[in-house]
Image (spheres, rainbow, N blue to C red):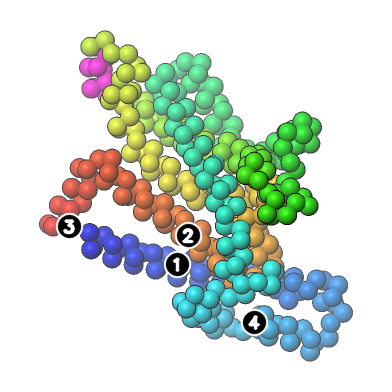
Amino acid sequence: MARFVLTNITKFVLLMLGVSLVTFVLVSISPVDPVQANVGQAAYASMGEEKRAQLAAYWGADTPLFERYFNWLGAALSGDLGMSLRYNAPVAQVIAERALNSLALMAVAWVVSGALGFLLGIFAGAYRGTVFDRVVKGYCYLLASTPVFWLGLLLLIVFSVQLGWFPLGLSVPIGVASSNVTFVDALHHLALPALTLSVTGVANIALHTREKTIDVMSSPYVRFARSRGLSTLRILREHGLRNLIMPAITLQFASIAEIFGGSVLVEEVFSYPGLGQAAVTAGLGGDAALLAGIAIFSAMLVFGGNLIANILYGVVDPRIAKREVTSDEL
């Protein structure tokens, strides 16, 4: 257990350092001028060289890359992630204000896409070659080749503009104080973005689960169960699920990164004030501190998901944990 904890702590620290460094490098080589992007092109053109130099010094744009990175890293180790240029607020505050919206959106999409993809994949594989299987495959292939932003625009046009069932965007009604926003209002604004993100996340899980189900259903112990007169549903329930749950856990927790990436586009389409929208704003404005903070937060989500998946392996199948212990002892 001590070795497991130490290994994961080391991986986590190295991941955070790598993600933050890559973020600063990408921002530094970007053609975006943070001073011009934040003051506006017209205001920047009318400024004198002295004023531009003052703003560049204030925002650290004239500081060498590694000096700027190590200054940020030293402050980050003490809990200060810096100031956001675009929002004129501490990075930690911007992330805290928007994290709840993004986490709610991703959590709904993650659960719905995982459950729906798992069920569709199981029944498509169990009834291979049937009309249901062909419909599921066609549905998944179509979704896999559909850009998420295009699907979001399509759903927005149909369900918000033409039918008027859902609001056009944002996470709360316009002109309503935050204290007066009800749970139903928040859920109403969350529904369509979450549906868009859920639908696009089904394809990968369903197709992989289908292939694994086909392998399980063609195994010798399933053929023996069929010879005993057991139905397909009973075989799946008593013999198939235990072998299908392991790859499903892997796919489900590996999809966290995909869900977060899709949420960036979905939040832009629906003007949903989450971390994805803030990341786009930070990237376009050369806001390295905010972009690094969001990148670290997303990396923590992915790392945490993979860690939970590894722990669940041992819970679902104790033989895995036993093999790991035996390997460590050897």
Q: Is residue 97 above or below residue 316?
A: below
* Pointer 1 residue: 16
x%, y% of residue 301?
47, 56
Separation of marks 3 and 4 at Cα, in angstroms: 48 Å
Give the mark nearer the N terminus: 2 vs 1: 1
The reply, left or right, for residue 234 in relation to residue 111 is left
Distance of label 3 from label 2 (alpha carbons): 28 Å
Disc 3 to disc 4: CB gap under 8 Å: no
Q: Earlier in the sequence, mark 3 or mark 2?
A: 2
Location of residue 280 in the rendering, given as x and y in whole percent from the top left corner: 66, 59
Read off the residue under disc 3: 328
Q: How far apart, in angstroms, are the residues tagged by discs 3 and 1? A: 27 Å
Quadrant in which the N terminus appears = bottom left
| CB contact under 8 Å: marks 2 and 1 | yes
Asked if one can make out residue 39 in the rendered structure from this viewpoint, the answer is: yes
> Mark 2 highlights which residue?
299
Which three-letter amino acid code belongs to the residue tagged 3? Asp
Q: Residue furthest front?
A: 180
Could you tell whether 257 is left or right of 325 in the image? right
Could you tell me which secondary element the residue under label 2 belongs to?
helix
Lateral position of residue 260 relative to residue 238, left or right: right
Quickly name the residue at label 4: 60
Magenta: predominant secondary structure element?
helix
In the foreground, 276 or 147: 276
Name the amino acid type tagged 1. Met
Mark 4, residues whose alpha carbon is within 10 Å: few (<14), some, or many (≥20)?
A: some
Callout 4 secondary element: loop
Stretch in magenta: 217-227
Q: Is residue 101 shown in magenta?
A: no
What amino acid type is highlighted by mark number 4? Gly
Q: Amino acid at mark 2?
A: Ala
Q: CA distance from mark 4 to mark 1?
A: 22 Å
